[in-house]
Amino acid sequence: MSDAFVRVTGLNKYYNVVGNRLHVLRDLDLSVNQGEMVAIMGASGVGKSTLLHVLGGLDTIDGGDVRVGEHDIAGMGDEARVAFRNRHIGFVFQFHHLLPEFTAVENAAMPLRIARVSAADARPRAEALLRRVGLGERLDHRPGMMSGGEQQRVAVSRALVMQPTLLLADEPTGDLDEATADSLHLLLREMHAEFGLTAIIATHNPRLAAQCDRMLRLEGGRLTPG
């Protein structure tokens, strides 16, 4: 597609497990348009996380072509992938991975601080996002003082604070109860539209997948329409 923002062709990925070569992704193709929100469904262990890690520059590949916008991910070295990831990718994981010794606003601002943005400039940007996701009264609370849903909202804010072009969410509601998960589903959809993001969400939750523009299923290392 001419307007495809994410373009994957012939992707192969192997892992060596106890002396055996496990073929996780097999000649996988994927095309996601600019501004689209796509759900990738599949059972645990089929390679959903691996695919997101490849797209976000967290993992290398064993064959194929992977492009995000004008960036050739497959052809990048380690340093280039780190720079690409920090600037262009927002990650939300099943487990929020917040740093317990830091407050909500400090956690949300962390990518900015890593990018050497001053605390004086980083805090207002992080605060604005936390207020937008409904945590205006929790700015200086540490993760241990917040519920699971609140912690995941901090994680969403952290993922968006660098204004990424691609949001990757890996089972973002997998550790939440149904009501809290539904609230986070709505938030992700709202933020996707508000920030003009392209988003790929790996999930086994059909309620979340149904809120996306398109659903794909990962089976046998390949993607098929869901």
Image (cartoon, rainbow, N blue to C red):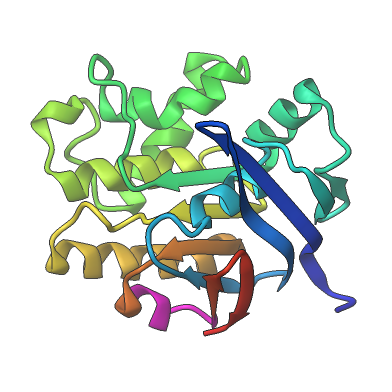
Magenta-span inclusion, residue 211: yes
Which residue corresponds to the image point at 76% horizontal and 57% vertical from the top-left? 11
Locate residue 208, reporting x and y percent.
35, 73
Magenta-span inclusion, residue 59: no
Locate residue 151, reporting x and y percent.
24, 41
Residue 129 visible within the image: no
Which residues lie in the magenta part?
Answer: 208-215
Q: Quadrant of residue 21?
A: top right
Which residue corresponds to the image point at 27% horizontal and 56% vertical from the top-left? 174
Which residue corresponds to the image point at 41% horizontal and 43% vertical from the top-left? 157
Locate residue 59, reporting x and y percent.
65, 36
Which residue corresponds to the image point at 62% horizontal and 14% vertical from the top-left? 116
Task: Name the image quarter holding the N terminus.
Answer: bottom right
Q: Name the one closer to the observer, 217 or 130.
A: 217
Rendered position, 62 above or below 192: above
Q: Name the one closer to the observer, 45 or 170.
A: 45
Q: Is 66 displayed left or right of 180 in the figure?
A: right
